[in-house]
Image (tube, rainbow, N blue to C red):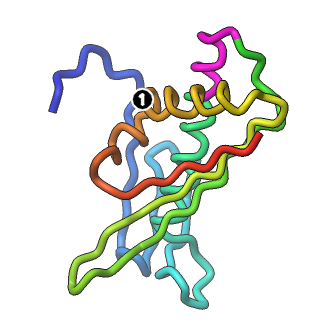
Amino acid sequence: MTSLKKVLYTARAHTRGGREGASRTDDGRLSVTLSPPGTAGNGTNPEQLFAVGWSACFLSAMQLVARKMKVAFPADTADDVEVDLCLTGDAFSLQARHTVRLPGVEPDIARAIVDAAHQTCPYSKATHGNIEVVTNVIT
C-alpha cells in the first residue's frame, strides 16, 4: 500500500447481519436494509451499492479529465455499471461492465476521456488487475 499524503475524506459504515442485515453510515445520511442478490427481500445488496458508488465516482473522474483536456462535457453523459457476483468452484469474485454515453463527443476523444478516467477514479484503480472490467463507449 502506498503512503497517503493527505486524507480527503473517510467514510464510516456499521453493518450487522451481513447480506441479510442492515448498514448505516456514522453521520446517518445513508441507512439501508440488505438482502441477498436475486431474492425477494426488500433491501439492496453490496453489488448494487458498489455499482452506484463506482458509476458516480467514474463520472466525476470523466468530468475532471474532460476539463483538463479542454473538452466540453455533455450534461447528459451517463455511466451504466453492471457488477456481477460470480462463483468459480467455491470461490466468489466480481466482474463489471461500464456502458458510458458521451453524446456528441468524437469517438476517439470519448475513448481517451474514458481511458484516462480509469487511471483517475479510485474505484477503477482499486479494481484494476483484480477483476475483469469491460468498458463500452457510446457517442
Q: Is residue 114 left or right of residue 128?
A: right
For the C terminus, which image quadrant? top right
Q: Residue at x 41, y 35 (%)?
A: 122
Nearer to us in this view, 119 or 122: 119
On screen, residue 135 above or below 90: above
In which image quadrant can residue 105 be found?
Answer: top right
In this picture, which residue range is highlighted in magenta?
62-70
Which kind of residue does numbered mark 1 sit on? Gln
74 shown above or below 12: above
Residue at 58 percent of width and 52 percent of height: 98
Q: From the viewer's perspective, is residue 105 above or below residue 37? A: above
Q: Main secondary structure of the magenta part?
A: helix
* Element marked by disc 1: helix
Viewer-side residue, 13 vs 38: 38
Residue under the image location 55 percent in, 37 percent down: 57
User: Mark 1 — residue?
Assistant: 119
At which x and y percent is residue 131?
34, 57
Q: Decide whether residue 129 is among the magenta residues.
A: no
Q: Position of residue 125 (x, y in %)?
A: 36, 37
- What residue lies at 50% left-to-right and 43% top-to-bottom? 27
